[in-house]
Image (tube, rainbow, N blue to C red):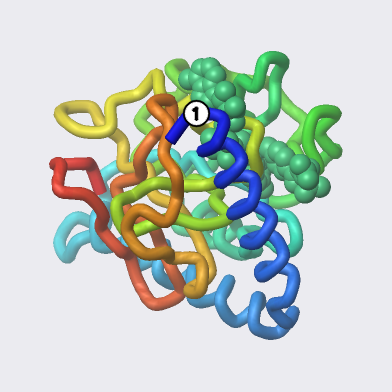
Amino acid sequence: MTASARDTDKAGLRASLRASRATLQASDREDQSDGLRRVVVQYLSDRYRPAGRLDSPLPTVAAYLGVDPEPATERLVGELRRLGFGVVVPVCEPAYRLSWVRWVPGVALQRSVRAPVQEPVGPRLAFDDLPDVGLILVPALGVDRTGNRIGQGGGYYDRFLADRPVDGPGAVPRLGMVYRTEVLPAGAVPSEPYDQPLGGAFTPDGLLRFGTRDRAV
Ligand SMILES: Nc1nc2c(c(=O)[nH]1)N(C=O)[C@@H](CNc1ccc(C(=O)N[C@@H](CCC(=O)O)C(=O)O)cc1)CN2
Ligand SMILES: Nc1ncnc2c1ncn2[C@@H]1O[C@H](COP(=O)(O)OP(=O)(O)OP(=O)(O)O)[C@@H](O)[C@H]1O
């Protein structure tokens, strides 16, 4: 298949995932967002607060601020801060690049000039200048069981993740967050060479691990 045929496939899949996301009832989205919050907090607590290690420093989570009808993340980021994790969220920069701003409860938000998302006001940091990021939460419209992801179509996360190792020492787990109907069969998301695979994805039912490679999760 040619690259342009795959682009058309991707556009069709993106439209259909957007349409089905839009049909989820608000109460269902809230329930699933609450499930996602618990699953992510459990994952981070298991990893960074195992019994007997109550005083180790906690890392920063590269999160994002979900906008309806995305899974809501406001309670999640609030809970992460209360637990002592750092939280940063992305800011859309020119040329589909991301910078990162610290999120704290009550921080002023403004709408991005580049995408229909909310961004905190504050100093913009390059990812490599963030100390100790332990998890990258990746927004997605859908993921397939090989770890291919389809997002909103800007290519922001593909460019960002391309600069970072998916496995080996120093790899930070990059895990999607989707509603339970958005986990698709292997191969359902058309993949281009620039598409960056995910090590797994959170759903309201738990963390799914993807791929035969030794991706960080
Ligand atoms: N909450 C959130 N923040 C994020 C992302 C995301 O997917 N979710 N991004 C992930 O990269 C970046 C922003 N990229 C985005 C690009 C487009 C749209 C979007 O919704 N666009 C139009 C669709 C236009 C069309 O039909 O083609 C829209 O739905 O109104 C959203 C985010 C950075 N921050
Ligand atoms: N590493 C890269 N370098 C240059 N262009 C890229 C790179 N990654 C992706 N792109 C471009 O970005 C465009 C959008 O990619 P894609 O459809 O995979 O976005 P997406 O993953 O759905 O979006 P997002 O990451 O913003 O949620 C593609 O047309 C591609 O040309």
In the image shown, does 112 or 60 lie closer to the viewer? 112
- Foreground pick, 2 / 36: 2
Q: Residue at left 62%, top 64%?
A: 71
Residue placed most toward the observer, 42 or 199: 199
Q: Quadrant of residue 7?
A: top right
Which x, y percent locates residue 45? 31, 61
Q: Could you say where residue 52 lies in the image, as x and y percent from the top left?
A: 15, 61
Q: Which residue is mark 1?
A: 3
Q: Is residue 107 visible?
A: no
Query: Where is residue 215, by image quadrant?
Result: top left
Q: Is residue 125 left or right of residue 180?
A: right
Whether 94 is drawn above or below 67: the answer is: above
Q: Amino acid at mark 1?
A: Ala
* Viewer-closest of 50 and 210: 210
Res 61 → quadrant: top left
Q: Secondary structure at mark 1?
A: helix
- Neighbor class of circle 1 (other Cα within 10 Å; few <14, some 14-19, many 20+) is few
Rendered position, 171 above or below 27: above
Q: How many marks?
A: 1
Q: Residue at x 57, y 45 (%)?
A: 10
Q: Is residue 28 above or below residue 151?
A: below
In terms of image quarters, where does ligand 2 lie?
top right
Ligand 2 is within 8 Å of the C-beta of the residue at disc 1: no
- Which residue is depicted at the point 24% across and 55% down? 47
